[in-house]
Image (cartoon, grey):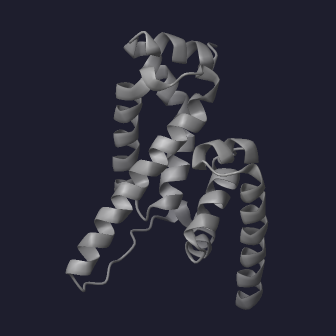
Amino acid sequence: MVAIEELVILAKKRDADAFTKLMQTQMQNMYKTARALLENDEDAADAISDAILACWEKLDQLKNPEYFRTWMTRILINKCNDILRKKKDLYFMGDESREIPFSPQEYDNAEWLETVKGLDKKYRMILILYYVNGLKTTDISAVLHIPVSTVRTRLSRAREQLALLYQLEA
């Protein structure tokens, strides 16, 4: 098995096969992150495809191959935020309520996703990157461009808010 760093180096040389393999190794994490931030699979798929294209186009800007995952995650988060901004603008135009599509296989994550949606965005983002994407606090710091101490504080506060939400529901 080829290491991610090796795939990044090959992809930077415009090896399309290496880039495809690289993105396949990241697809599950990308989906989990996008799906946690966005409300449906279609939006998540759009964000992922936009992020993949942006990664291919800007791969030469990545200085250190070992930071590919955090760099790619930052791009994905930006694409998710773009979609959320566009949706926000559309919802100001109309008054229609929307339904969230739901499939039975998503049942396990549904309660957690609904609970996390109730948190402030700065806390929700930290929780998603930490628990869903499995990033360390130092990596989250790099992705969000905030100090590690801020990441740890927000993670702690997010956990406290989640505990309060669960206590209220019980």
Image point (53%, 12%), residue name: 9
Q: Is residue 123 visible?
A: yes
The quadrant holding residue 70 is: top right
Vertical relation: 170 (above or below) 86: below
- In which image quadrant can residue 112 be found? bottom right
Number of marks in the rendered image: 0
Q: Which residue is more in the foreground, 145 or 12? A: 145
Q: Nearer the viewer, residue 20 or 59?
A: 59
Measured as percent of width and height from the top left, residue 126 is found at 65, 58
Q: Quadrant of the C terminus?
A: bottom right
Q: Quadrant of residue 152?
A: bottom right
Q: Quadrant of the N terminus?
A: top right
Q: Is residue 49 above or below residue 4?
A: below
Residue 58 place in picture, x, y as percent = 39, 27
Q: Left or right of 98: which side holds 66?
A: right
Residue 82 image offset from top left, x and y in percent: 36, 56
Residue at 45%, 64% in the rendered image: 103
| Residue at x 41% of width, y 43% of height | 48
Q: Is residue 136 visible?
A: no
